[in-house]
Image (spheres, rainbow, N blue to C red):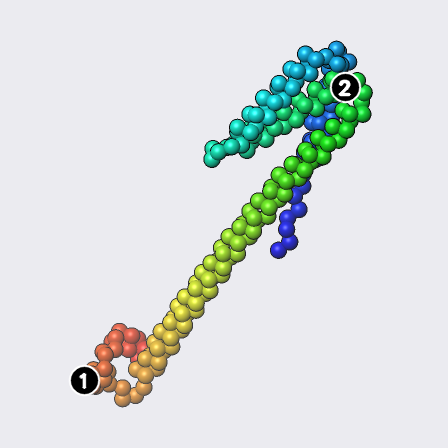
Amino acid sequence: MSPPTLTRHPLATAAPAIATSTVLILGRIWNANGAQHSVGDAALVTVLATAAGAAGVVASMGWAGDKVIAGTAFATSGALALAGVAGYADGISLPLLLWALATAIAYGIAARHWRTDRREAIAHDRRTALRREEHAHLERVEALRAGAQIEVAREGAAYAEALAAALTARAALPGFDPAALTRAGLPELPTIEITKGSAA
């Protein structure tokens, strides 16, 4: 069985690049509006990024760790760090370098999730195909059983018809005495059928 081809929406494929590009653009807009070399703004973003990273660490620890919350917290921390650098730096080279790095990391994480989705879809298709084969096998067995029952019933009807014809023919023979058969221990033949056969 060939593995299924999973079609992914173009926006889903471009989502990591769109997200990192949006953060970079917002950081540069923030840079143009007074965040360049602003220690207060840089400190604020640093505190927020550190808090988001710590929340991600806490969410991923222990038996009750939530992967979705942890992933969201780490993504928020990275986005704040990228926005802080893009807002604080005076040139565009460092923000672009960090944007390229963040985009590569985002695509790496997304590719891992896409592989997981593909494996789950393939496993689901295999289970569905197995269930279809099991149902088809049961249907074939039931069809064979029904056919055998129909054939047995048809053979029984043909045997009964042949037996009735033989009894009718034997009753029509000259010198046939059904009472003698009964005295010999044979089952009594239906007299109505014999009378009808004799009359015929």
Image quadrant where one finds the N terminus? bottom right
Query: Which residue type does callout 2 highlight?
Result: Ala
Out of 46 and 194, give the one closest to the viewer.
Answer: 46
**Observer-nearest of 113 and 143:** 113
Name above or below for residue 61 compared with residue 172: above
| Distance from the alpha carbon under mark 2 to that under mark 1 | 123 Å
Identify which amino acid the numbered label 1 is placed on: Arg
Residue located 66% across and 46% down the image: 5
- Which residue lies most toward the left here? 183
Callout 2: helix, strand or loop?
A: loop
Q: Residues within 10 Å of mark 1 (few under 14, many from 20)?
A: few
Dot 2 corresponds to which residue? 89
The residue at 27%/86% (across/down) is 176
The C terminus - image quarter? bottom left
Find numbered disc 1 in the image and state the secondary structure of the residue it sits on. Answer: helix
Count of numbered circles on the image: 2
- Residue 150 visible, this angle: no
- Asked if residue 59 is positioned above or below residue 169 in the image, the reply reads above
N-terminal of the pair, mark 2 or mark 1, is 2
Residue 148 appears in which quarter of the rendering? bottom left
Circle 2 packing at 10 Å, graded few (<14), some (14-19), many (20+), is some
Residue 73: where, in percent of width, then height? Answer: 59, 26
Residue identified by numbered label 1: 183
Q: Tell me the tag on residue 135.
A: none
Residue 149: image location, x then y, percent: 41, 66
- 142 vs 80, left or right, is left
Task: Write the residue at 36% across / 74% down.
Answer: 160
- In front of the other: 24 or 90: 90
